Image: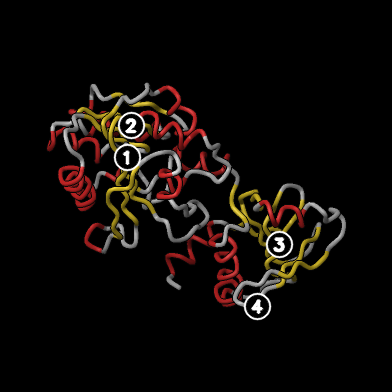
Amino acid sequence: MTDKILEKFRQLLVREDGIIESVYNFQACDKFKEIFDQCPGHKSFLIDIDINNKIILCVTDNSDGVRIKIGDKYLYIKKGPVYNEDILRNDIYPIFIQLLYLGVIFPSNKDILSYWEKPEDDLNGAECYAAEDQLVKSKYLGDIIEKYCKNVASAFEIGCNIGRNINYLKTKMGLSVGAIEISKYAIEQMKIKYDALADADIYIGNAPEVIKKVPNQAYDIVYSMAVLMHIHPDVKEDFWENIVRISNKYLITIENELRSSERNWHRNYEQIFTELGLKSIYSETLGHEQLLFGYQVRIFEK
Protein backbone atom coordinates (compact mmCIF):
# COMPACT_ATOMS: atom_id res chain seq x y z
CA MET A 1 0.00 0.00 0.00
CA THR A 2 1.53 3.30 -1.03
CA ASP A 3 1.83 6.35 1.22
CA LYS A 4 -0.18 8.32 -1.33
CA ILE A 5 -3.14 5.93 -1.05
CA LEU A 6 -2.90 5.92 2.74
CA GLU A 7 -2.94 9.72 2.81
CA LYS A 8 -6.09 9.65 0.70
CA PHE A 9 -7.62 7.37 3.34
CA ARG A 10 -6.59 9.68 6.17
CA GLN A 11 -8.32 12.59 4.49
CA LEU A 12 -11.60 10.69 4.62
CA LEU A 13 -11.49 10.50 8.40
CA VAL A 14 -11.79 12.93 11.30
CA ARG A 15 -10.76 12.08 14.85
CA GLU A 16 -12.98 13.21 17.73
CA ASP A 17 -13.09 11.93 21.33
CA GLY A 18 -11.45 8.62 20.56
CA ILE A 19 -13.64 8.07 17.51
CA ILE A 20 -12.35 7.97 13.94
CA GLU A 21 -15.33 8.89 11.82
CA SER A 22 -15.71 9.23 8.07
CA VAL A 23 -16.42 12.76 6.86
CA TYR A 24 -18.91 11.26 4.39
CA ASN A 25 -22.39 10.18 5.30
CA PHE A 26 -22.39 6.91 3.39
CA GLN A 27 -25.21 4.98 1.80
CA ALA A 28 -25.59 1.22 1.94
CA CYS A 29 -26.32 -1.06 -0.98
CA ASP A 30 -29.89 -2.36 -1.11
CA LYS A 31 -29.07 -5.79 0.27
CA PHE A 32 -27.08 -4.46 3.21
CA LYS A 33 -29.59 -1.68 3.87
CA GLU A 34 -32.32 -4.25 4.54
CA ILE A 35 -30.18 -5.71 7.33
CA PHE A 36 -28.94 -2.37 8.59
CA ASP A 37 -32.39 -0.81 8.90
CA GLN A 38 -33.42 -3.53 11.29
CA CYS A 39 -30.89 -2.34 13.86
CA PRO A 40 -32.35 -0.06 16.59
CA GLY A 41 -30.23 3.06 16.96
CA HIS A 42 -29.56 2.46 20.65
CA LYS A 43 -28.36 -1.15 20.34
CA SER A 44 -25.46 -2.95 18.77
CA PHE A 45 -25.29 -6.25 16.97
CA LEU A 46 -22.91 -8.19 14.78
CA ILE A 47 -23.14 -8.52 11.01
CA ASP A 48 -21.03 -11.24 9.48
CA ILE A 49 -19.74 -10.07 6.08
CA ASP A 50 -17.22 -12.35 4.45
CA ILE A 51 -14.44 -10.14 3.05
CA ASN A 52 -11.21 -12.08 2.72
CA ASN A 53 -12.60 -14.38 5.42
CA LYS A 54 -11.66 -11.98 8.19
CA ILE A 55 -14.28 -9.39 9.01
CA ILE A 56 -17.22 -9.05 11.34
CA LEU A 57 -18.77 -5.59 11.33
CA CYS A 58 -20.49 -4.08 14.33
CA VAL A 59 -23.29 -1.54 14.29
CA THR A 60 -23.94 0.62 17.34
CA ASP A 61 -25.04 4.08 18.36
CA ASN A 62 -21.83 5.31 19.99
CA SER A 63 -18.50 3.68 20.78
CA ASP A 64 -14.76 4.12 20.43
CA GLY A 65 -13.34 2.87 17.17
CA VAL A 66 -13.44 3.51 13.46
CA ARG A 67 -16.91 4.07 12.07
CA ILE A 68 -18.83 5.04 8.97
CA LYS A 69 -22.08 6.93 9.32
CA ILE A 70 -25.03 5.55 7.38
CA GLY A 71 -28.12 7.67 7.91
CA ASP A 72 -28.65 7.91 11.67
CA LYS A 73 -26.63 4.78 12.49
CA TYR A 74 -22.98 3.78 12.42
CA LEU A 75 -21.16 0.91 10.80
CA TYR A 76 -18.01 0.06 12.74
CA ILE A 77 -15.01 -1.30 10.90
CA LYS A 78 -13.26 -1.71 14.24
CA LYS A 79 -14.49 -1.34 17.79
CA GLY A 80 -12.29 0.03 20.56
CA PRO A 81 -9.43 2.53 20.40
CA VAL A 82 -6.92 2.60 17.57
CA TYR A 83 -3.48 2.99 19.12
CA ASN A 84 -1.21 3.49 16.13
CA GLU A 85 -0.96 4.05 12.40
CA ASP A 86 -0.07 0.40 11.76
CA ILE A 87 -3.57 -0.68 12.81
CA LEU A 88 -5.08 1.99 10.56
CA ARG A 89 -2.83 1.00 7.68
CA ASN A 90 -2.84 -2.79 7.91
CA ASP A 91 -6.14 -3.75 9.53
CA ILE A 92 -8.72 -1.05 8.92
CA TYR A 93 -7.88 0.50 5.56
CA PRO A 94 -8.04 -2.77 3.53
CA ILE A 95 -11.49 -3.55 4.97
CA PHE A 96 -12.74 -0.04 4.19
CA ILE A 97 -11.49 -0.27 0.60
CA GLN A 98 -13.01 -3.73 0.17
CA LEU A 99 -16.40 -2.40 1.30
CA LEU A 100 -16.13 0.32 -1.35
CA TYR A 101 -14.85 -2.00 -4.09
CA LEU A 102 -17.64 -4.49 -3.44
CA GLY A 103 -20.25 -1.74 -3.49
CA VAL A 104 -21.46 -2.50 0.05
CA ILE A 105 -21.18 1.18 0.96
CA PHE A 106 -20.75 4.38 -1.01
CA PRO A 107 -20.87 8.16 -0.36
CA SER A 108 -24.09 10.08 -0.94
CA ASN A 109 -24.68 11.72 -4.30
CA LYS A 110 -24.60 15.12 -2.59
CA ASP A 111 -21.05 14.53 -1.36
CA ILE A 112 -19.93 13.25 -4.75
CA LEU A 113 -21.36 16.25 -6.62
CA SER A 114 -19.84 18.65 -4.09
CA TYR A 115 -16.39 17.18 -4.74
CA TRP A 116 -16.64 17.38 -8.53
CA GLU A 117 -17.86 20.98 -8.53
CA LYS A 118 -14.26 21.95 -7.71
CA PRO A 119 -11.80 19.18 -6.89
CA GLU A 120 -9.09 20.47 -4.58
CA ASP A 121 -6.59 17.67 -5.15
CA ASP A 122 -3.95 17.49 -7.87
CA LEU A 123 -5.42 14.34 -9.37
CA ASN A 124 -8.64 15.86 -10.73
CA GLY A 125 -8.03 19.62 -10.77
CA ALA A 126 -8.61 21.58 -13.99
CA GLU A 127 -4.95 22.54 -14.29
CA CYS A 128 -3.92 18.87 -14.13
CA TYR A 129 -6.23 18.02 -17.04
CA ALA A 130 -4.56 20.68 -19.18
CA ALA A 131 -1.01 19.46 -18.52
CA GLU A 132 1.07 18.74 -21.62
CA ASP A 133 1.62 15.09 -20.75
CA GLN A 134 -2.15 14.51 -20.70
CA LEU A 135 -2.45 15.21 -24.42
CA VAL A 136 -1.66 11.55 -25.12
CA LYS A 137 -5.22 10.77 -24.00
CA SER A 138 -6.72 13.29 -26.41
CA LYS A 139 -4.56 11.99 -29.26
CA TYR A 140 -5.67 8.43 -28.55
CA LEU A 141 -9.30 9.56 -28.65
CA GLY A 142 -8.71 11.27 -31.99
CA ASP A 143 -7.00 8.18 -33.39
CA ILE A 144 -9.85 5.80 -32.63
CA ILE A 145 -12.40 8.28 -33.97
CA GLU A 146 -10.50 8.49 -37.25
CA LYS A 147 -10.22 4.71 -37.44
CA TYR A 148 -13.70 3.58 -36.40
CA CYS A 149 -16.14 6.48 -36.77
CA LYS A 150 -17.00 7.26 -40.39
CA ASN A 151 -18.38 10.50 -41.83
CA VAL A 152 -18.55 12.46 -38.58
CA ALA A 153 -18.53 16.23 -38.17
CA SER A 154 -19.31 16.77 -34.48
CA ALA A 155 -18.53 15.38 -31.04
CA PHE A 156 -19.97 15.87 -27.55
CA GLU A 157 -18.13 15.05 -24.32
CA ILE A 158 -19.84 14.08 -21.09
CA GLY A 159 -17.61 15.66 -18.44
CA CYS A 160 -15.08 17.75 -20.37
CA ASN A 161 -13.34 19.35 -17.35
CA ILE A 162 -11.13 22.15 -18.72
CA GLY A 163 -11.77 21.04 -22.31
CA ARG A 164 -8.52 19.40 -23.38
CA ASN A 165 -10.24 16.68 -25.40
CA ILE A 166 -12.77 18.86 -27.19
CA ASN A 167 -10.07 21.42 -27.96
CA TYR A 168 -8.01 18.67 -29.59
CA LEU A 169 -10.96 17.37 -31.60
CA LYS A 170 -11.76 20.85 -32.84
CA THR A 171 -8.28 22.18 -33.60
CA LYS A 172 -6.66 18.95 -34.85
CA MET A 173 -9.62 17.23 -36.49
CA GLY A 174 -11.97 20.08 -37.40
CA LEU A 175 -14.97 18.73 -35.49
CA SER A 176 -17.73 20.90 -34.11
CA VAL A 177 -17.79 20.25 -30.36
CA GLY A 178 -19.94 20.58 -27.27
CA ALA A 179 -19.87 19.22 -23.74
CA ILE A 180 -21.32 18.90 -20.27
CA GLU A 181 -19.25 19.88 -17.24
CA ILE A 182 -20.26 20.19 -13.59
CA SER A 183 -17.40 22.50 -12.54
CA LYS A 184 -17.95 26.19 -13.21
CA TYR A 185 -14.31 26.76 -12.26
CA ALA A 186 -13.11 24.35 -14.96
CA ILE A 187 -15.19 26.16 -17.59
CA GLU A 188 -13.79 29.52 -16.47
CA GLN A 189 -10.30 28.09 -16.95
CA MET A 190 -11.32 26.70 -20.34
CA LYS A 191 -12.16 30.20 -21.56
CA ILE A 192 -8.67 31.34 -20.56
CA LYS A 193 -6.76 28.29 -21.82
CA TYR A 194 -8.48 27.45 -25.13
CA ASP A 195 -9.53 30.31 -27.42
CA ALA A 196 -10.84 27.84 -30.00
CA LEU A 197 -13.64 26.79 -27.62
CA ALA A 198 -15.16 30.26 -27.31
CA ASP A 199 -18.18 29.21 -29.39
CA ALA A 200 -18.48 25.65 -28.07
CA ASP A 201 -21.88 24.66 -26.71
CA ILE A 202 -21.15 23.96 -23.02
CA TYR A 203 -23.84 22.80 -20.60
CA ILE A 204 -22.85 23.45 -16.98
CA GLY A 205 -24.27 21.24 -14.26
CA ASN A 206 -24.85 17.66 -13.11
CA ALA A 207 -24.78 15.45 -16.23
CA PRO A 208 -27.89 13.33 -15.50
CA GLU A 209 -29.92 16.53 -15.22
CA VAL A 210 -28.50 18.89 -17.85
CA ILE A 211 -28.21 16.22 -20.55
CA LYS A 212 -31.98 16.52 -20.84
CA LYS A 213 -31.44 19.97 -22.40
CA VAL A 214 -29.33 18.61 -25.29
CA PRO A 215 -31.40 18.15 -28.49
CA ASN A 216 -32.07 14.75 -30.05
CA GLN A 217 -29.23 13.39 -32.24
CA ALA A 218 -27.38 16.67 -31.80
CA TYR A 219 -23.86 15.23 -32.28
CA ASP A 220 -22.44 12.51 -34.49
CA ILE A 221 -20.29 11.22 -31.62
CA VAL A 222 -21.06 11.26 -27.91
CA TYR A 223 -18.21 10.12 -25.69
CA SER A 224 -16.89 9.95 -22.13
CA MET A 225 -13.40 9.48 -20.76
CA ALA A 226 -13.19 8.46 -17.09
CA VAL A 227 -16.48 10.22 -16.28
CA LEU A 228 -19.39 7.79 -16.43
CA MET A 229 -17.60 5.74 -13.77
CA HIS A 230 -18.15 8.67 -11.38
CA ILE A 231 -21.90 8.77 -11.90
CA HIS A 232 -23.59 7.84 -8.62
CA PRO A 233 -25.31 4.43 -8.25
CA ASP A 234 -28.59 6.25 -7.61
CA VAL A 235 -28.67 7.57 -11.19
CA LYS A 236 -31.99 7.00 -12.93
CA GLU A 237 -32.24 4.79 -16.00
CA ASP A 238 -33.19 7.72 -18.22
CA PHE A 239 -29.62 9.07 -17.99
CA TRP A 240 -28.32 6.19 -20.13
CA GLU A 241 -31.29 6.61 -22.45
CA ASN A 242 -30.49 10.31 -22.89
CA ILE A 243 -26.88 9.51 -23.80
CA VAL A 244 -28.18 7.35 -26.63
CA ARG A 245 -30.80 9.96 -27.57
CA ILE A 246 -28.34 12.80 -28.21
CA SER A 247 -26.01 10.67 -30.35
CA ASN A 248 -26.56 10.69 -34.10
CA LYS A 249 -24.12 7.93 -35.04
CA TYR A 250 -21.62 6.75 -32.41
CA LEU A 251 -21.01 6.42 -28.68
CA ILE A 252 -17.54 5.95 -27.16
CA THR A 253 -16.90 5.00 -23.53
CA ILE A 254 -13.40 4.96 -22.03
CA GLU A 255 -14.06 3.91 -18.46
CA ASN A 256 -12.87 1.81 -15.54
CA GLU A 257 -15.10 -1.27 -15.60
CA LEU A 258 -13.11 -3.39 -13.13
CA ARG A 259 -13.59 -1.95 -9.65
CA SER A 260 -15.35 0.61 -7.51
CA SER A 261 -13.89 3.02 -4.95
CA GLU A 262 -15.08 5.98 -2.90
CA ARG A 263 -15.88 8.06 -6.00
CA ASN A 264 -16.31 5.63 -8.88
CA TRP A 265 -18.42 2.58 -9.68
CA HIS A 266 -17.72 -0.17 -12.15
CA ARG A 267 -20.40 -0.97 -14.72
CA ASN A 268 -20.73 -3.13 -17.80
CA TYR A 269 -21.22 -0.47 -20.47
CA GLU A 270 -21.56 -3.04 -23.23
CA GLN A 271 -24.59 -4.48 -21.48
CA ILE A 272 -26.07 -1.06 -20.70
CA PHE A 273 -25.89 0.31 -24.22
CA THR A 274 -26.54 -2.81 -26.27
CA GLU A 275 -29.74 -3.27 -24.27
CA LEU A 276 -30.65 0.26 -25.38
CA GLY A 277 -30.28 -0.73 -29.02
CA LEU A 278 -26.66 0.18 -29.85
CA LYS A 279 -24.29 -2.14 -31.69
CA SER A 280 -20.84 -2.76 -30.23
CA ILE A 281 -18.23 -2.37 -32.98
CA TYR A 282 -14.92 -2.15 -31.10
CA SER A 283 -13.42 -2.88 -27.68
CA GLU A 284 -9.94 -2.89 -26.16
CA THR A 285 -8.26 -2.62 -22.77
CA LEU A 286 -5.77 0.23 -22.49
CA GLY A 287 -2.16 -0.05 -21.42
CA HIS A 288 0.25 2.31 -19.70
CA GLU A 289 1.00 4.31 -22.86
CA GLN A 290 -2.42 6.02 -22.81
CA LEU A 291 -2.12 6.89 -19.08
CA LEU A 292 -5.38 5.00 -18.49
CA PHE A 293 -4.04 1.58 -17.61
CA GLY A 294 -6.72 -1.10 -17.43
CA TYR A 295 -9.52 1.15 -18.69
CA GLN A 296 -11.94 -0.40 -21.16
CA VAL A 297 -12.60 1.31 -24.48
CA ARG A 298 -15.92 0.61 -26.19
CA ILE A 299 -17.29 2.03 -29.42
CA PHE A 300 -20.98 1.65 -30.24
CA GLU A 301 -22.89 2.46 -33.41
CA LYS A 302 -26.54 3.42 -33.69
The label on residue 19 is 3
Q: Which mark is residue 54?
A: 4
Q: Nearer the viewer, residue 229 or 18?
A: 229
Query: Which amino acid, by three-letter code, is at mark 4?
Result: Lys
Residue 15, image x and y in percent?
Answer: 65, 60
Left or right? Give the position of 300 relative to 194: right
Return the residue at label 2: 247
Between disc 4 and disc 1, whose residue precedes? 4
What amino acid type is highlighted by mark number 1? Leu
Name the mark on residue 251: 1
Asked where in the image residue 175 lies, by quadrant, the reply is top left
Q: Earlier in the sequence, mark 3 or mark 1?
A: 3
Determine the residue positioned at 20% across, 45% down. Answer: 148
Q: Amino acid at mark 3?
A: Ile
In the image, taking residue 37 as reference, residue 177 lies left or right, namely: left
Dividing the picture into quarters, in which one does residue 224 lie?
top left
Disc sitting over residue 116 in the figure: none
Q: Which is nearer the N-term, disc 2 or disc 3?
A: 3
